[in-house]
Image: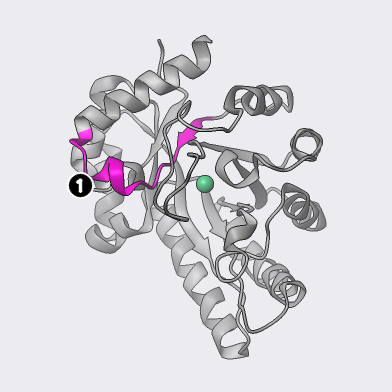
Amino acid sequence: MDLQKLCIHTITNKPWSLTEALDAYCTKGIGGISIWQNIVETLGARETGRILHDYPIAVVSYVRGGFFAHTSEDGRQKAVDANKKLLDEAAEIGAPMMVLVCGSDPHQSLTTSRDQIKEAIEKLIQHATSLGITLTIEPLHPMYADTRSAVNTLEQANDLAEYFDCPAVGVAVDVYHLWWDPNLEDEIARCGRGKNLDAFHICDWKSPTTDMLNDRGLMGEGCIPIEKISNWISAAGFNGFDEVEIFSNNYWAMDQHEFLELIITAYINLHDD
Ligand code: ZN
């Protein structure tokens, strides 16, 4: 099967260096890669961009900016400044979008955190536009609403994106965060209509899940109706990459070439059923 629409997040094969990941992905004919910040922290943005340039693979996104909500004004300003720098890095590595984990501060209400997220994105639009990079809002599962993101439903992400109504702001749909939402089909359609559907992240929800962060499953291993959601995404006009984003202590402990085979098989099964 053609793997040109398959993209893998570097965090999925966390034990690999960038070149190890690129060698393996390109050997398999995988079409895209999303670069996590730890890679750029290690290599620098220029070197990361230089390495990527030599491989026949698309840089799909830079992961991740955000964390905008803070009780202090100083904290909020530092977050905006840090995100401007991250946007510069995204440009240097050739990524067309930067995924936002929008942030939340448990010492204030979610509503206040959401207002601060909106203000921060407003301050970044000009910089993002000048670089031609989309700020891609990723709603996170409500179990992360205390510190990681006060944007927890696709409806909230759509509201934000439609408020700005510009090419520099879009939305990422991650099945892990949104599969439970009874309004998901309608909100995916709305996201497509608003031309805000920029990214589709896949993995699975294992039952039981033993770790709130690092026990994600391979597609087909859990209870998320990925194929159904994928069909809604296609129906909404999305023609981009299927981005595999798996944080898993179990899979990170495996031989990463064997893990990559499992990912490819799971991806093929997802589309062949
Ligand atoms: Zn994601």
The residue sitting at 62% across, 75% down in the picture is: 69
Label 1's element? loop
The residue sitting at 43% across, 43% down in the picture is: 216
Left or right: where does residue 3 sit relative to residue 131? left
Name the one closer to the observer, 57 or 245.
245
Left or right: where does residue 18 sit relative to residue 119? left
The residue to which callout 1 is attached is 17
Give how far across and how far down residue 138 sits, in percent. Answer: 60, 52
Give how far across and how far down residue 44 sits, in percent. Answer: 27, 61
Give the vertical position of 97 relative to 59 (above or below).
Answer: below
Give the vertical position of 142 relative to 270 (above or below).
Answer: below
The residue sitting at 56% across, 74% down in the picture is: 80
Give the vertical position of 208 relative to 223 (above or below).
Answer: below
Left or right: where does residue 90 sit relative to residue 185? left
Quadrant of the rendered image containing residue 25: top left
Question: 10 Å neighbourhood of mark 1: few (<14), some, or many (≥20)?
Answer: some
- Residue 23 in the magenta stretch? The answer is no
Q: Is mark 1 within 8 Å of ligand 1?
A: no
The residue sitting at 77% across, 73% down in the picture is: 111
Give how far across and how far down residue 229 sits, in percent. Answer: 65, 28
Magenta stretch, residue numbers: 241-256
